Amino acid sequence: MNARIPEDALPPALDPQALQAYVDDKWDAQIVPALTDYIAIPAKSPAFDPDWEKHACIERVVRDAAAWVEAQKVPGLTLEVVRLPGRTPVIFFDAPATRGDGGDTVLMYGHLDKQPEFDGWRSDLGPWTPKYEDGRLYGRGGADDGYAVYASLTAIMALDRQGVPRPRCVGLIETCEESGSYDLLPYVDALRERMGRVALVVCLDSGAGNYEQLWMTNSLRGLVGGVLEVQVLDEGVHSGDSSGVVPSSFRILRHLLDRLEDSASGRLLPESFHCAIPAERAGQARATARILGEEVWRRLPWSCGADGGFVLPMVADPEQALLNRTWRPTLSVTGAEGLPPLAAAGNVLRPRTAFKLSLRLPPLVDAAAASQELKALLEADAPYNARVTFKPDAGCATGWNAPSTAPWLEAALDDASRQYYGAPCGYIGQGGTIPLMNMLQEGFPTAQFMVCGVLGPKSNAHGPNEFLHVPYGKKLTAAVAQVIAAMRSSIPARRRVRP
C-alpha cells in the first residue's frame, strides 16, 4: 500500500488495506471477465446504430449488467430496468443506507452504450475483440465506461463487507450517452422522486491526467454536432468539361468553414462561442501543468512530420494546451460523404460534399443557442446560390463547471488519493462532454460532485486500441468507497452548516 493516512482521517472502522484487497479480488475474479464479455458486444449508441432495438446489442449489455448486480445480493438492494416508450433503457438500482443517514443519497452514474468501431486498430486487437495484456483490457467501451456499474456496486460492497456505515446509494446507468444523452432527461424527471435528496454525484465516465494519482474533473466542454452539406449539381460531370464553370462543392464548403474558424490558427471566430475562464479554473490548470508538464501533449500518438520529426502541437506550453482543450471552443471534422475512395476517384466534378462537424464549446456557453447560431452562420448567403444545409444532431449538450467543492469532500478526495495512490488529488478539466452533469447540477443544486474516471494517457477512448487501465480502475474503486464512507461520517457536520 502507498503512503499511510492518519487513522483519525479515515472513516470509522475502515481498513483501507482490506478494502483494496477486496476490490482487487472482485476486479480479477468478476469485473474483468464481465467486461471481457461486454467488450465483445457491439452495443453502439443509437446515433451510430439507428436499428439498435432490432439488433438488441444494447438490450444484451443491459441485461448482463443487471444480472451481475442482482447476483451480488447486497442487503435490501433493488434493481429495475426502466423503459420509457421509444427510448433506450436505463438501469436504476437502490442500495439502502446502513445504520441510517438522515436521507442523503449518493447517485452513481455510468453508461453502457459505445462509440462505433473506427479503424487503425493494432493487428491483434479490434473494437469487439477483447484482449487483456499487461494490466490493460483492450476493446471498445470497457473504459468508456462499461466498468462504471461494476465498480460502483463493488465500492458499496467493499464498505458493507467491513460494516462501515454508508449513506443510501442509487445507480443510474444509461444507454444513450454517446449520442448526447437525449433520452436521459425524461428518465431523470421520471426517477427524480425515487432518487431522493442527492448530496453527492459519483460519475465514473471521465479521465485522468496520469495513472499515479486520483484525478477530479472540474469542468467539461459542451458539444454541438451536425452535418454541413453543399450541393451544386444533380449528378457528377466530367471535370475537364465543367471545372471553371461549376463551382466546386468542396471549395464552397471550405469557404463556409472560414466563417467559423481561422484555418491558420484554429481559433473559432464567433465571440459568442467563447467565454471568460474563471480564475479558479485557470489556477488549477496552472497547477496541473506543473504536474504533467509536456506530457499534456506528448502523450498523443503523433505522426512523423515533413522533416522526419514529429508533427508539432498547436501550442507547446502545457498550461495553454490544457486551457485549449478545456475552456476554448474547437472544431473537428469527424466524417465526410460525397468523396469516393481514392482507388475509385475518377476525373469527375462531384455533385455534393458533406462534412460531419463536431464543435466543442467552453463549459459556460449555452449549446442550444450555439447550435442555432451555427446553423444561421453556415446557411446564410450561400456562395453561388448553392444548396447549403446544416442539420444539427438530435443531442446537443451544454458543458459543465463544477460547483465549489465542500471542505469535507476536498479533504476526503485528497485522503483517498494519498491512501491508494501515494500522491495528492489532482484537478483537471476535460475536453469531452457528459450531458448528465449539467442536468444534475440544475436538478440537485446543493449536490457535490465526484467526477472521475480511468481514461488516462493513451487509453484512446473513441479511437483505435482503446483500453482500460485495470490497476488504476482498482485503485479508483477503492477511492470511491472511501469517499462515500467519508460522506457518511461527515453528515452531522454538514447538517450543522446547512442554512
Image (cartoon, helix red, strand yellow):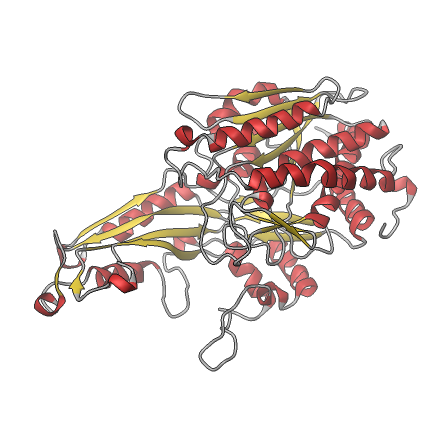
Between residues 463 and 343, which one lies in front from this camera angle? Answer: 343
Q: Name the residue located 87 percent from the left edge and 47 percent from the top edge.
A: 5
Along the viewing direction, whichever of 44 and 204 lies nearer the viewer: 44
**x, y percentage for residue 216?**
66, 48
Above or below: residue 357 compared with residue 189: below
Q: Residue furthest bottom?
A: 307
State whether residue 407 appears in this view.
Answer: no
Q: Residue at x 52, y 68 (%)?
A: 302
Quarter-of-image position of residue 134: bottom right
67 on left or right of 19? left
Q: Quadrant of the C terminus?
A: top right
Specify whether 482 is left or right of 43. Answer: right
Task: Please state which of residues 81 and 172 is positioned toward the viewer in this rendering.
Answer: 81
Q: Quadrant of residue 451?
A: top right
Position of residue 447 relative to residue 225, above or below, is above
Q: Where residue 430 sits: x, y (%)?
A: 57, 51
Q: Is residue 279 left or right of residue 484?
A: left
